[in-house]
Image (cartoon, grey):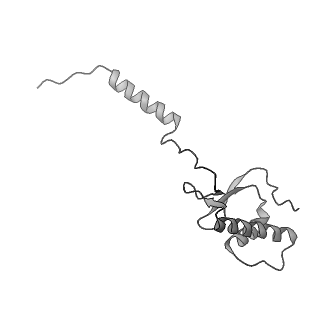
């Protein structure tokens, strides 16, 4: 079988305007993969490896239409139908939370006086 997955790290790429996927596929094969996913025909000048990338894209589209894959609502990434949504991101980073807590702690623990009228 052809080894088109030669990238070192997984990264998110766009398959179409509304669908992304996390993959380590080599950059040179991405146009063929996208062409297969969106339904374009093969290019007669492609070699066997690009044709294989096109077939993978086509298979992903067929699996999406058959319900084997789904587009995750939270980030538009194509995943297996049984994969659950990732936990939500916190509203604030840890540093922001500590900073806010420190501010409120100082505000409420500081002495204050009520102005007399």
Q: Residue furthest left?
A: 117
Left or right: 96 with respect to 31? left
Q: Residue at x 79, y 67 (%)?
A: 53
Quadrant location of the N terminus in the rendered image: bottom right
Q: Residue at x 33, y 21 (%)?
A: 110
| Residue 33 screen position, x and y as percent | 74, 67
Tell which of 17 and 86 is nearer to you: 86
Question: What is the quadrant of residue 15 in the picture?
Answer: bottom right
Residue 55 to residue 69: above or below:
below
Residue 6, picture quadrant: bottom right
Q: Nearer the viewer, residue 103 or 71?
A: 71
Residue 37 drawn at (x, y percent): 69, 69
Q: Please state, as top left, top right, bottom left or bottom right, where the C terminus lies in the image.
A: top left
Q: Residue at x 48, y 30 (%)?
A: 98
How many numbered circles does the render carry?
Answer: 0
Residue 9 picture location, percent across and down: 75, 50
Vertical order, 25 against 65 (above or below): above
Q: Nearer the viewer, residue 31 or 88?
A: 88
Q: Residue at x 59, y 56 (%)?
A: 72
Q: Is residue 115 above or below residue 78?
A: above
Look at the picture and state if 89 lies above or below 7. Answer: above
Q: Is residue 113 left or right of residue 18?
A: left
Q: Residue furthest top?
A: 111
Residue 88: image location, x then y, percent:
53, 45
Using the image as rendered, state which of residue 74 and residue 62 is in the foreground.
62
Please state if 49 lies on the left or on the right of 76 as rendered: right
């Amino acid at each position: 079988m052809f080894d088109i997955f030669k990238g070192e790290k997984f990264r998110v790429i766009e398959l179409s305007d509304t669908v992304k996927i996390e993959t380590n596929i080599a950059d040179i094969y991405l146009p063929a993969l996208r062409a297969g996913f969106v339904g374009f025909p093969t290019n007669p000048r492609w070699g066997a490896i690009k044709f294989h990338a096109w077939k993978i894209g086509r298979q992903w589209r067929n699996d999406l239409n058959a319900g084997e894959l789904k587009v995750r609502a939270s980030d538009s990434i194509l995943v297996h139908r049984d994969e659950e949504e990732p936990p939500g991101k916190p509203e604030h980073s840890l540093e922001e939370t500590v900073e806010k807590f420190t501010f409120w702690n100082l505000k409420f623990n500081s002495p204050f006086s009520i102005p007399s009228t």
